[in-house]
Image (cartoon, helix red, strand yellow):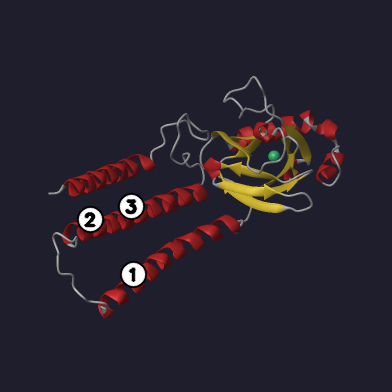
Amino acid sequence: MSRVGRQLLGMATIALMAAGITLVTGGAAFAELGQPEPWEWHLQGSGSPVMDNIVWFHNFLSVLIIVITLFVLALLVIVVMKFNAKANPVPSRTTHNTLIEVVWTLVPVLILVGIAVPSFRLLFLELDVPKADLTVKATGKQWYWSYAYPDNGKFEFDSLMAQDKQPRLLGVDNEMVVPVNKVIRVQVTGADVIHAFALPAFGVKIDAIPGRLNETWFKATKTGMFYGQCSELCGKDHAFMPIAIRVVNDQEFASWVESAKKKYASGGTSTFASAAGPTQ
Ligand SMILES: [Cu+2]
């Protein structure tokens, strides 16, 4: 075997090993659920059905890409080995082969259809808000979030990054609290500039645009803390307006609502106009 051949073989082996590692570790979540980990390179662990589907689609595409890449690499290796000037001094003069032309047109079309079907299914799952158990309105402001609970006594409160809380840059003073295993409809808007409401573990990312009400949803399947960040560059403190969602059971949620009604009552109903009014 020539030196080039050995090098190519080595590269193929490394690619195969990398593919194997991806498959083994891709789905595993080593870190705490709902937050990033140092040197993270895979998706955050899933905490909602939408994210389950996103993780599945990601893994499916990864396998497809790895198989196609290895196939093309193998073809290149064969061409380099078998059809170089030394090994094949008199080249064939073939220019057409109907069968192979049909195959290399049809197979990519079938692959694209195979990607399109689950891709559209996922898009519709994200876009179609199921019948909601609870609506929360999230308003992006420079530079914090406000959460309103129109179904539970119409209170609204601000959620600002807390310097002293962990995880660093993700902890807030007042978390958004939602019940577990309930469909939460999130209405998202911006009060000043465009922000974006994003929470990786729930597979949620939607723009918060002034004068417009966007809608998304999630159903948290596990209790605990989940963190996200504003994901649209919105000014100097864009990096310091985290989103923290505490998922609790029904009883804890009910008692939180009772205490929140009292705690945030001072804001009054006028705070509901916050999205419309200027903040300067
Ligand atoms: Cu922002």
Q: CA distance from mark 3 to mark 2?
A: 16 Å
The answer to which of marks 3 and 2 sits earlier in the sequence is: 3
Q: Do the residues bearing badges 2 and 1 touch, measured as CB atoms within 8 Å? A: no
Q: Is residue 211 left or right of residue 23?
A: right
For label 1, the crowd category at 10 Å Cα-Cα, with few meaning under 14, some 14 to 19 and many 20 or more, is few
The quadrant holding residue 100 is bottom left
Q: Is residue 138 visible?
A: yes
- Quadrant assignment, res 161: top right
- Viewer-closest of 66 and 254: 66
Q: Residue at x 79, y 43 (%)?
A: 192
> Image check: 150 left or right of 106?
right
What kind of element bears circle 1?
Answer: helix
Q: Label 2, secondary structure: give it.
A: helix
Residue at the image point whose x is 64% and y is 19% from the top: 164
Residue 13 on image: x %, y %: 23, 44
**Marks 3/1: CA distance?**
16 Å
At mark 3, the secondary structure is: helix
Q: Residues within 10 Å of mark 2 (few under 14, many from 20)?
A: some
Q: Report the amino acid beneath label 3.
A: Ile
Q: Is residue 27 above or below residue 39?
A: below
Q: Which mark is residue 66?
A: 3
Quarter location, residue 83: bottom left
Nearest to viewer (mark 3 / mark 2): 2
Three-letter amino acid code of the residue under disc 1: Val
Where is the C terminus found, in terms of image quarters? Answer: top right
Q: Is residue 45 above or below residue 112?
A: above
- Residue 249, compared with residue 8, is above or below; it is above
Give the mark, 3 or 1, whose residue is nearer the N terminus.
3
Badge 2 is on which residue? 77
Which residue is identified by label 1? 107
